[in-house]
Amino acid sequence: MKTSVLSTATLLAALAVAGCATPPAQVLDGMEPMAINAALERGRFELNCPTAEAALLSRELAQPAIETVRFSGPQRGVFTVGISGCGQRKTYQTICPEGGSGCFSADTLGNIR
């Protein structure tokens, strides 16, 4: 009987926590403007084109690289952003940690020559 009560309490606690989790699409929606802006700023600088424009090509929510019982890293939004302008174009991968204050934009392998 004691085990049954404990199992029920554990199940209810897990459901309560899961119910508070933010859906992945909502998390990505919150990060998207920062991700696009980070890629756009870098692209405008590298292309030397202040009128360059950005287009979101893809996005996904990456799970933490490390997850243990005691520690879990942040989820990360991974965005692929295309920048075009002044007769040039480049693609950037932009990574935004959940709950972070900024994003990091990096070249994709297609840009490396």
Image: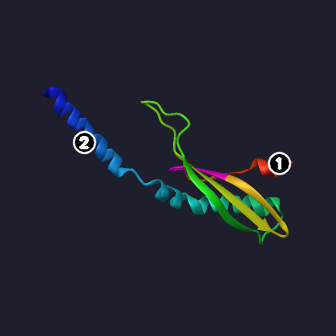
Measured from the top left, where is residue 32 in percent x and y? Answer: 58, 60
Give the answer, above or below, for where 62 lies relative to 8: below
Magenta stretch bounds: 94-100
Q: Amino acid at mark 1?
A: Ile
In percent of the image, x 80 and y 52: which residue is there? 111
Residue 94 shown left or right of residue 108 in the figure: left
In percent of the image, x 78 and y 69: which residue is there? 50
| Res. 72 mark | none
Q: Which residue is mark 1?
A: 112
Q: CA distance from mark 1 to mark 2?
A: 51 Å
In percent of the image, x 68 and y 52: which residue is there? 93
Q: Which residue is mark 2?
A: 12
Give the answer, above or below, for where 22 lies relative to 44: above
Measured from the top left, where is residue 20 in percent x and y? Answer: 35, 51
Residue 88: quarter of image: bottom right
Give the answer, above or below, for where 53 lies relative to 42: below
In percent of the image, x 26 and y 36: which residue is there? 10
Q: Amino acid at mark 2?
A: Leu
Residue 40 in magenta stretch: no
Residue sitting nearer the eye, 93 or 105 = 93
